[in-house]
C-alpha cells in the first residue's frame, strides 16, 4: 500500500494513468477538506470530488473540477432570481451565529445559496445534495464519501483528512475570508496577512487516515499551504508523517509555479516561493521528485523527471519517478 495526499489538482493529475503502478484499491487518497464550503445548505468538498470524479471517469479535465459536459441550469436560475430581485451577488456569509450552529462539519464556511459565488453544475449539485443528506441522516463524512465512491464506481479508498470541521481562512488586508472567497471570487488578489486553519487544534485525522499513514506516503504536486497545510495542522497527522517514509513531488520548477496561488501563499507563510520553500514546508519528507529543468539542490535525495502532468502517460512517468524515490529511501511498498 502507498498513500497519496491530495488537494484538488496536482495529486489527481498524478494519479491519472498511475493504476498500473499503484493499483487503486491499494492506493488510498487522503483528501484536504479545508477548502470545503457549505453553499445554500449543501456541503461542497472540492478536493474529495475531484478525486472521485477523476477516478469515476467523469471529471472535467479542462478545469480539473466539476463534471465533464455538466449543465448549469440551476446555477443560472439562481442568478436570474438574484438579478431580478436586485440582490447583490458575491459571497454571502451567513451570520456569525449561524456559522457555529447547525451542521457541525460546515462550521466557519457557511454561505447562503443566494447568487451563489461558485458555479455548481447540475450533476455536480446532485452529489452535494446526496452527501449532505447522508450527513444529516447521521453518517460521517468518511462513510458518506465511501458511499459516493460506490455510486461513482470508484475503487480507490478516498478518505477525507478528518470527520471534524477545519476551515482555511485567509486573513487579508481586506479582512478575513474563506479560501474559496479568496481564490474563486477574489482571484487570489488581496494581500495576505496570515493563514488560519480554523478548527485544526480540535480536529483529528480519522482512524482510516491514520491506518493509511502507516504506509509510505506520496505528496503529489500540491499546494503545500492550503492543500497539505490543513492536514499537517493536526498534530497526530504531522506526527504520523514524521514516522513513515514520505516522497513529495514539487509543484514548482525552481521558482516557477505550474498554476495557482502556491507561491503567494508560501511567501505569506514565511517560506520561499519555490521548490526550496516546498522542501522547507515539508521537513518530514525524505525524498523529492523534481522536474529535470529544476536545478534546486536539497539536503534530501532527489529523483528528476519531466513533472508536467496532463495525460495518463505523464502520470505514469512521474509515478515511475516516485517509485524510484521510494526505493532510494528504502520504503517498503507491500
Ligand atoms: P488546489 O487545486 O488548489 O486544491 O491545488 P493542489 O494542491 O491540488 O495543487 C495545486 C498545485 O499543483 C499548484 O501549486 C500547481 O503548481 C501544481 N500543479 C498543477 N499542474 C501541475 C503539473 O502539471 N505538474 C506539477 N509538477 N505540478 C502541477
Image (cartoon, rainbow, N blue to C red):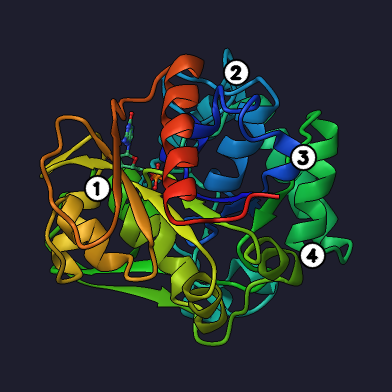
Spatial CA distance of label 2 from label 1 is 24 Å
Q: First in sequence: mark 4 or mark 3?
A: 3
Looking at the image, which residue sits at the far bottom?
Answer: 202
Residue tagged 4: 140
Q: Residues within 10 Å of mark 2 (few under 14, many from 20)?
A: some
Q: Residues within 10 Å of mark 4 (few under 14, many from 20)?
A: some
Residue 135: image quadrant is bottom right
Q: Residues within 10 Å of mark 3 (few under 14, many from 20)?
A: few
Q: Is mark 1 within 8 Å of ligand 1?
A: no
Residue tagged 1: 186
Residue tagged 3: 25
Point out the frontmost of discs 4 and 1: 4
Left/right of residue 261 with respect to residue 220 in the rendered view: left
Spatial CA distance of label 3 from label 1 is 38 Å
Residue at 27% x, 59% y: name it.
300
- Image position, residue 268 (x, y; %): 16, 66
Q: First in sequence: mark 3 or mark 1?
A: 3
Quick check: which quadrant has ligand 1? top left
- Image position, residue 13 (x, y; %): 46, 30
Does the residue at mark 3 contact the one at mark 1 (Cβ under 8 Å)? no
Residue tagged 2: 70
Point out the frontmost of discs 4 and 3: 3
Spatial CA distance of label 2 from label 4 is 27 Å
Spatial CA distance of label 3 from label 2 is 28 Å
Q: First in sequence: mark 2 or mark 1?
A: 2
- Image position, residue 137 (x, y; %): 89, 61
Q: Does dot 3 land on a helix, a strand or a loop?
A: helix
Residue 120: image quadrant is top right
Q: Residues within 10 Å of mark 1 (few under 14, many from 20)?
A: some
Spatial CA distance of label 4 from label 1 is 32 Å
Amino acid at each position: 500500500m502507498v498513500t497519496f495526499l491530495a488537494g484538488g489538482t496536482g495529486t489527481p493529475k498524478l494519479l491519472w494513468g498511475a493504476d498500473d503502478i499503484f493499483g487503486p484499491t491499494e492506493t488510498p487518497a487522503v483528501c484536504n477538506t479545508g477548502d470545503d464550503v457549505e453553499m445554500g445548505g449543501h456541503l461542497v468538498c472540492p478536493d474529495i470530488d475531484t478525486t472521485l470524479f477523476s477516478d469515476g471517469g467523469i471529471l472535467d479535465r479542462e478545469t480539473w473540477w466539476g463534471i465533464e459536459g455538466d449543465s448549469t441550469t440551476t446555477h443560472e436560475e439562481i442568478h436570474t432570481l438574484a438579478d431580478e430581485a436586485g440582490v447583490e451577488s458575491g459571497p454571502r456569509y451567513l451570520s456569525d451565529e449561524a456559522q457555529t450552529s447547525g451542521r457541525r462539519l460546515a462550521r466557519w464556511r457557511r454561505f447562503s445559496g443566494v447568487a451563489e459565488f461558485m458555479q455548481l453544475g447540475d450533476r455536480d449539485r446532485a452529489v452535494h445534495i446526496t452527501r449532505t443528506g447522508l450527513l444529516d441522516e447521521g453518517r460521517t463524512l468518511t462513510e458518506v464519501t465511501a458511499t459516493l465512491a460506490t455510486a461513482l464506481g470508484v475503487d480507490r479508498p478516498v478518505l477525507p483528512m478528518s470527520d471534524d470541521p477545519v476551515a482555511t481562512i485567509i486573513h487579508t488586508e481586506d479582512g478575513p475570508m474563506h479560501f474559496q472567497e479568496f481564490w474563486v471570487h477574489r482571484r487570489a488578489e488581496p494581500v495576505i496577512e496570515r493563514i488560519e486553519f480554523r478548527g485544526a487544534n480540535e480536529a483529528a485525522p480519522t482512524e482510516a487516515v491514520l491506518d493509511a499513514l502507516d504506509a509510505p506516503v506520496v505528496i503529489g504536486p500540491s499546494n503545500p499551504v492550503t492543500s497539505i497545510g490543513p492536514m499537517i495542522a493536526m498534530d497526530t497527522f504531522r506526527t504520523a508523517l514524521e514516522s513513515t517514509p514520505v516522497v513529495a513531488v514539487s509543484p514548482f520548477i525552481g521558482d516557477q509555479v505550474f498554476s495557482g496561488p502556491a507561491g503567494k501563499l508560501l511567501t505569506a507563510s514565511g517560506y520561499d516561493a519555490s521548490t526550496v520553500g516546498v522542501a522547507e514546508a515539508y521537513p518530514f519528507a525524505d525524498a523529492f521528485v523534481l522536474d529535470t529543468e529544476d536545478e534546486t539542490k536539497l539536503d534530501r535525495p532527489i529523483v528528476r523527471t519531466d513533472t508536467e502532468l496532463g495525460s495518463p502517460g505523464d502520470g505514469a512517468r512521474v509515478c515511475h519517478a516516485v517509485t524510484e524515490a521510494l526505493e532510494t529511501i528504502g520504503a517498503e511498498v507491500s
